[in-house]
Image (cartoon, helix red, strand yellow):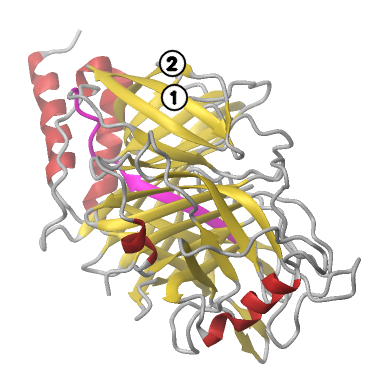
């Protein structure tokens, strides 16, 4: 039974977490206290707090996020809380890691990344990691500190990041998407969300690639009514499930199934930010066959559905920073290309920078390998990764100090759905002959034709606005018809899932 004094103390701490942007030295202590409230005092700390959609003020210098939906071996950055301190330019990540405590596997909050960041002219944050995990999960101080991690942020709303995981003498990308996690969703009616599922290397059969979700809150219970689709588009069976939101050591999170916070084998953790971003982390435990709250059996990234159809001209006329993610793209050219910091919208179809892309697409449109049935339409964004050649090899460097991004990818949004604003179910992704591990000077040559190679494949895209900035999330499947494909070192076109995640630039 809660005493009046304990209940009052717990409520005070919940309000403090919501309304203050306090320093990192205090935050872990207060989050730990709130987590203790949940464990010891029960529902008294799990009440929903009223959300706000106001953008952060000039005084809001420290932002708190929950990370998902990617599952990273060893480091497991997918279920983590993060702080970006814009006063001290510091970033820290704490994750829930399974450890043996007295012979029993126990989930323990653990600091896994600590470092600093500086802003580049391209809008990316250059992150230096002083502490980072290795492939076994060991958290190790780095001397010298690791460089090569990047992030883009909509302050107070969310972050897209490529952190680093140490594997022996090499570094591997550890992607993470984050959404603000300071309050549970309010009990007021929630606008529908659009979402994409995140590609997973071990997933051999898709059950959902994207969808829409209506979220209804009743007290601390959170109901998800979802309609998932496969890229095609192919409608899947709808679902209606219930989770519960509470304040935890990782912030305000919704767990599905209801009351499953302590069950690691059957758990999806979801952050629904007041700004309109949504991320979830799906823990694929032993024997777990659940498709999760969103039907895909993986984590998701989403955004609130716009109230009116988006202006496609405005969308493709803007500039974006973010990441191209391909979990099976383990070809090596002295750097890891599973996650590539990229930019879109700086170039157009007629830009000289896009000439290699465009000529390779034309060479395979009705000829060559015949892998490009149609060329990009006027509803297309052009861009690609930042790739710099150095004396020690190629580097993915979006600081802009060595030039702009390449143009080797096009995203054709196609037609906007007539039912769901911001949904583009028949998008297309185009990959040119200069996509890594190739370049304009060393183009991709098809192993089966001996001529210049390029591909296109179907995708789905969702577009929304967060604090006045467009966000674009794209998903392409290895099981669609035709499947998503990227080049390998041998001129082949292996199938693999692909995701593209972009935030609009503000500078």
**Which mark is on residue 270?**
none
Q: Residue at x 17, y 24 (%)?
A: 188
Answer above or below: position of 170 versus 282. below
Is residue 92 located in the magenta-colored stretch of the structure? no
Q: Quadrant of residue 52?
A: top left
* Residue 187 spot, x, y in % from top left: 19, 22
**Label 2 belongs to which residue?**
240
User: Magenta residues?
Assistant: 173-187
* Residue 182 spot, x, y in % from top left: 24, 40
Q: Nearer the viewer, residue 109 or 353?
A: 353
Is residue 176 located in the magenta-colored stretch of the structure? yes
* Residue 57 spot, x, y in % from top left: 11, 58
- Where's the C terminus, which quadrant? bottom left
Answer above or below: position of 388 versus 185. below
Residue 240 visible in the displayed image: yes
Q: Residue at x 44, y 39 (%)?
A: 195
Check whether the beta carbons of the residues at disc 1 and disc 2 lie within 8 A of each other.
yes
**Label 1 belongs to which residue?**
226
First in residue order: circle 1 vs circle 2:
1
Secondary element at tag 1? strand
């Amino acid at each position: 039974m809660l005493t009046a004094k304990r209940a009052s103390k717990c409520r005070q701490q919940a309000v403090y977490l919501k309304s203050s942007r306090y320093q990192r030295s205090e935050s872990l202590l207060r989050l730990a206290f709130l987590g203790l409230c949940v464990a010891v005092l029960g529902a008294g700390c799990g009440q929903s707090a009223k959300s706000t959609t106001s953008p952060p003020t000039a005084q809001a210098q420290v932002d708190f996020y929950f990370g998902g939906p990617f599952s990273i071996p060893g480091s497991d950055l997918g279920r983590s809380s993060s702080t970006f301190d814009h006063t001290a330019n510091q970033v820290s990540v704490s994750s829930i890691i399974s450890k043996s405590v007295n012979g029993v596997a126990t989930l323990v909050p653990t600091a896994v990344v600590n470092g600093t960041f500086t802003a580049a002219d391209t809008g990316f944050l250059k992150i230096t990691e002083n502490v980072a995990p290795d492939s076994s999960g060991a958290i190790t101080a780095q001397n010298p500190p690791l460089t090569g991690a990047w992030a883009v942020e909509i302050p107070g709303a969310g972050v897209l990041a490529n952190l680093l995981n140490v594997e022996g003498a090499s570094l591997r990308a550890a992607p993470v998407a984050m959404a603000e996690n300071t309050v549970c969703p309010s009990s007021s009616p929630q606008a529908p969300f659009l979402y994409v599922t995140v590609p997973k290397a071990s997933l051999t059969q898709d059950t959902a690639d994207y969808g829409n979700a209506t979220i209804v809150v009743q007290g601390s219970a959170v109901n998800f009514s979802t309609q998932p689709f496969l890229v095609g588009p192919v409608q899947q069976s709808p679902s209606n499930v219930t989770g519960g939101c509470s304040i935890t050591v990782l912030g305000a999170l919704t767990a599905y199934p209801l009351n499953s916070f302590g069950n690691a084998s059957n758990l999806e953790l979801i952050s629904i930010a007041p700004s309109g971003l949504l991320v979830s982390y799906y823990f694929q435990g032993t024997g777990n066959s659940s498709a999760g709250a969103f039907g895909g059996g993986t984590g998701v990234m989403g955004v609130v559905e716009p109230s009116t159809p988006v202006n496609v001209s405005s969308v493709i006329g803007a500039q974006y920073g973010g990441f191209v993610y391909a979990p099976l793209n383990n070809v090596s050219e002295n750097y890891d290309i599973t996650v590539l910091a990229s930019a879109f919208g700086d170039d157009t179809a007629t830009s000289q920078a896009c000439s290699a892309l465009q000529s390779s697409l034309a060479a395979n449109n009705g000829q060559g390998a015949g892998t490009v049935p149609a060329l990009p339409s006027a509803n297309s964004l052009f861009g690609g990764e930042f790739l710099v050649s150095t004396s020690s090899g190629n580097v993915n460097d979006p600081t802009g100090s060595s030039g702009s991004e390449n143009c080797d990818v096009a995203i054709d949004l196609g037609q906007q759905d007539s039912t769901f604003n911001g949904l583009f179910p028949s998008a297309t992704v185009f990959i040119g002959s200069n996509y890594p591990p190739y370049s304009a000077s060393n183009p991709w040559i098809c192993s089966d034709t001996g001529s210049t190679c390029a591909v296109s494949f179907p995708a789905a895209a969702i577009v929304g606005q967060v604090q006045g900035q467009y966000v674009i999330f794209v998903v392409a499947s290895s099981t669609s018809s035709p499947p998503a494909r990227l080049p390998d070192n041998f001129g082949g076109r292996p199938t693999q899932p692909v995701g593209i995640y972009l935030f609009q630039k503000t500078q």
